[in-house]
């Protein structure tokens, strides 16, 4: 047996733990354990899952919650936040990690992740940890990418499990209880009868079924031995005011080992919340504070009876001292709310009521638990019987914290436990110069709008299933943005007009708003809020202004001619409702408005025809270093430099040569529509930066070939 209580410590700080895990790793299926699902990888590329090899944010690996004010990166390996997955993220800042408000450049999260621990029936004390150990994996198949949904989507039902309204395909069953991309009941349909919650919902499935052997950890007691788990994860975000400062998360943890029970199990959420402007780099980690607050409160909504709410909130904030290492510029607070878990009213197999079991905080200066024994002790706290709540941290430092639920007396084979938390952000009280130590009312004052936002998160989560329910504006339409020569056409369908409010069921569509963003420089992966402007508002009584007489995408069309070819523009179409069913104390309707971020699309207007290569052009030509064409750094263009071939056909191969005929780089262009472009980051096939000179390019495509020149000037 490999009991984790035989403890050897290997201390790694958050700044380099990801790099260590990216080193040589050997993967092996644990003898006698439950086998991974079909098509699960049995070999592992040493960089698999790391940022350098990851696809785009819409593909396998990660997605961004960006409809609200809290921009949060989620993954399908149990990790939240950008920086642990991407060790170079502070330098390139390619994704918001826990950015609040979105587009501000202030991040509040290094990484957070799921921890599950217990004692197996063969006597082993095991913990599977997403952060920092990276011990969960997902199938690298298209159906196992993170999947995105929204309330009001076609095929979605307002109440999961209610077959009177939820049998969308008419087979007499509410078939799919989780959106996982598979035909779980074998009826030939995928994710039918689903219930999507919130205006942006992401789902994923991942597993703990394999051993990780890191050659730099020589003690076999410190290797990872799997609990053999399947995790179903769903996360939720909203755009409307009062509910746009938090992201809710559901976990369902299932024991898929056919011959082993897990005893005295705990489920926890570990958070390394580094707070500060991303421009200050990794220095932001060393001057943070952490604490925990728990209280009961009454909340009375307009026209409603008072609600009794219990708030359980761990949080971290940046040192407000202007002399701190990041200048005290980040004035927000990031909290993680403990919301719910599986209960047993008799208290035999699970706690009899929802309550936190432990809040633990510790420093990255030598206190990170580096084996299963230590991690299990953090989950358990001081004992199985009593709640453990650590006090406020003693000084500013690089802190982490953990909230946990349990103990779950048994998780037999094919049994599950559930666990719910929420990220919530807010603004601390600017009038308070210091943090109060023991006075709860003063703590609540210091936490400022974080308290208000936490109350709203608790209300939306609710105290009964289904959770995460609130009224919302209509979903966005399905849109198409078509760039042209000197114009961009925005086209969309009428889907929002057919969708009722997900909470009240009222058909309350009010109109559309068309949005444009100018000035984006990729400092953040999405434009800042202040860069968006509304071009046109079309009420439901005035739709003839944009109607085309067609059906589907293209039923409505708006053309923007205030553009310059070759430059980036974002467009979006959002919906709003009439406010019917939602009234203030004077009886006035309260309309709700969708967000431009729900449907935002990036385009580059251009000239030319795709039928020949005659109008293909290189921009900029010549390329000059540090010219206005350069944008902010990204993973692809980490220097911010790019050269683009515009007006390409749907497929083409571009080969770049020196004047001496040496091949510099080959680009493969494959786009769903013609008149598109492919860009190059000026990195050669030998991973070197291009030097000054004249270069040749050769384009090969189904519509012909073309040879041209361009210059690089440094």
Image: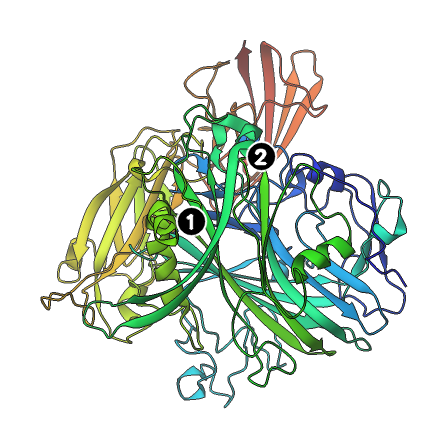
Q: Quadrant of residue 128?
A: bottom right
Vertical relation: 604 (above or below) 578: above
Q: So how many labels did they put on this image? A: 2
Vertical relation: 290 (above or below) 171: above
Vertical relation: 95 (above or below) 637: below
Vertical relation: 186 (above or below) 317: below
Q: Which residue is more in the foreground, 488 or 103?
A: 103
Image quarter (top left, top right, bottom left or bottom right) of the C terminus: top right
* C-alpha gap between disc 1 and disc 2: 18 Å
Q: What element carries label 1?
A: loop
Q: Can residue 446 be seen in this view?
A: yes
Left or right: 294 with respect to 88? left
Give the residue furthest to the bottom.
Answer: 172
Using the image, tell me which numbered label, if any, was put on residue 66: 1
Tell me where residue 193 appears, x and y as whole percent.
Answer: 48, 78
Image quarter (top left, top right, bottom left or bottom right) of the N terminus: bottom right
Q: Earlier in the sequence, mark 1 or mark 2?
A: 1
Name the residue: 29% across, 76% down.
505
Name the residue: 71% across, 71% down.
264
Q: Which residue is more in the foreground, 147 or 162?
A: 162
Pointers 1 and 2 in contact (C-beta within 8 Å): no
Residue beneath label 2, please? Answer: 89
Name the residue: 69% across, 69% down.
265
Give the residue furthest to the left.
Answer: 586
Q: Is residue 637 visible?
A: no
Left or right: 685 with respect to 192? right
Q: What element carries label 2?
A: helix
Using the image, tell me which numbered label, if any, was put on residue 223: none
Tell me where residue 4 appears, x and y as whole percent.
Answer: 82, 57
Q: In which quarter of the image is residue 602?
A: top left
Tell me where residue 344 appears, x and y as whole percent.
Answer: 58, 82
């Amino acid at each position: 047996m490999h009991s984790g209580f035989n403890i050897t410590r290997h201390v790694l700080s958050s700044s380099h733990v990801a790099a260590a895990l990216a080193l040589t790793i050997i993967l092996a299926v644990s003898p006698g354990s439950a086998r991974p699902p079909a098509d699960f990888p049995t070999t592992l590329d040493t960089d698999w899952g790391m940022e350098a090899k990851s696809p785009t944010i819409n593909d396998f690996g990660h997605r961004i919650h960006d409809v609200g004010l809290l921009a949060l990166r989620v993954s399908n390996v149990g990790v939240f936040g950008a920086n642990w997955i991407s060790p170079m993220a502070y330098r390139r800042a390619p994704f918001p990690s826990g950015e609040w408000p979105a587009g501000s450049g202030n991040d509040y999260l290094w990484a957070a992740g799921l921890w599950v621990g217990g004692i197996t029936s063969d006597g082993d004390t095991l913990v599977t940890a997403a952060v920092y150990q990276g011990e969960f994996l997902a199938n690298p198949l298209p159906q196992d990418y993170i999947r995105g949904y929204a309330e009001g989507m076609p095929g979605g039902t307002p109440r999961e499990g209610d077959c009177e309204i939820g049998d969308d395909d008419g087979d007499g069953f509410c078939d799919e209880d989780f959106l996982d991309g598979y035909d779980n009941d074998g009826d030939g349909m995928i994710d039918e009868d689903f219930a999507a919650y919130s205006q942006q919902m992401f789902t994923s499935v991942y597993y703990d079924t394999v051993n990780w052997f890191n050659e730099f950890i020589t003690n076999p007691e410190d290797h990872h031995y799997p609990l053999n788990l399947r995790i179903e994860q769903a996360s939720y975000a909203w755009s409307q005011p009062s509910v746009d400062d938090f992201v809710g998360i559901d976990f369902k943890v299932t024991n898929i080992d056919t011959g082993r029970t897990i005893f005295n199990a705990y489920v926890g959420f570990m958070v390394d919340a580094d707070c500060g402007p991303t421009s200050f780099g990794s220095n932001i980690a060393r001057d943070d504070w952490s604490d925990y607050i728990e209280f009961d409160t009454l909340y009375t909504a307009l026209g409603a009876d008072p609600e009794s709410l219990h708030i359980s909130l761990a949080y971290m904030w940046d040192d407000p001292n202007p002399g701190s290492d990041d200048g005290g510029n980040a004035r927000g607070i990031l909290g993680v709310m403990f919301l719910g878990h599986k209960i047993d009213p008799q208290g035999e197999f699970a706690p009899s009521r929802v309550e936190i079991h432990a809040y633990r905080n510790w420093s990255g200066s030598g206190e990170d638990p580096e084996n299963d024994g230590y991690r299990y002790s953090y989950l358990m706290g001081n004992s199985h019987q009593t709640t453990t709540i650590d006090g406020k941290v003693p000084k500013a430092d690089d802190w982490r914290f953990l909230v946990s639920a349990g103990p779950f007396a048994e998780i037999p084979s094919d049994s599950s436990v559930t666990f719910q938390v929420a990220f919530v952000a807010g603004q601390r009280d600017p009038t308070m110069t210091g943090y109060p130590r023991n006075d709860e009312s003063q703590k609540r004052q210091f936490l400022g709008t974080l308290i208000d936002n936490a109350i709203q998160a608790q209300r939306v989560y609710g105290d009964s299933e289904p959770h995460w329910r609130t009224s919302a504006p209509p979903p966005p339409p399905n849109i198409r943005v078509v760039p042209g020569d000197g114009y961009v056409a925005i086209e969309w369908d009428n889907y929002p007009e057919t969708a009722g409010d997900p909470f009240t069921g009222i058909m309350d569509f009010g109109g559309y708003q068309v949005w444009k963003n100018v000035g984006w420089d990729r400092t953040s992966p999405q434009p800042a809020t202040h860069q968006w402007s509304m071009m046109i508002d079309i009420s439901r009584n005035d739709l003839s202004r944009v109607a085309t007489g067609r059906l589907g995408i293209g039923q409505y069309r708006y053309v923007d001619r205030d553009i310059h070819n070759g430059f980036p523009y974002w467009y979006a179409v959002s919906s709003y409702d009439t406010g019917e069913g939602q009234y203030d104390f004077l009886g006035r309707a309260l309309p709700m408005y969708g967000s431009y971020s729900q449907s935002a699309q990036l385009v580059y207007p251009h000239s030319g025809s795709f039928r020949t290569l005659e109008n293909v052009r290189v921009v900029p030509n010549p390329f000059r270093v540090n010219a206005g064409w350069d944008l902010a750094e990204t993973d692809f263009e980490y220097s911010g430099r790019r050269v683009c071939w515009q007006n390409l056909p749907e497929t083409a191969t571009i080969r770049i040569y020196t004047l001496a005929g040496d091949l510099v780089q080959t680009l493969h262009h494959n786009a769903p529509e013609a008149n598109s472009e492919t860009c190059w980051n000026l990195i050669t096939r030998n991973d070197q930066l291009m030097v000054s000179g004249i270069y040749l390019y050769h384009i090969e495509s189904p519509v012909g070939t073309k040879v041209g020149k361009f210059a690089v000037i440094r």
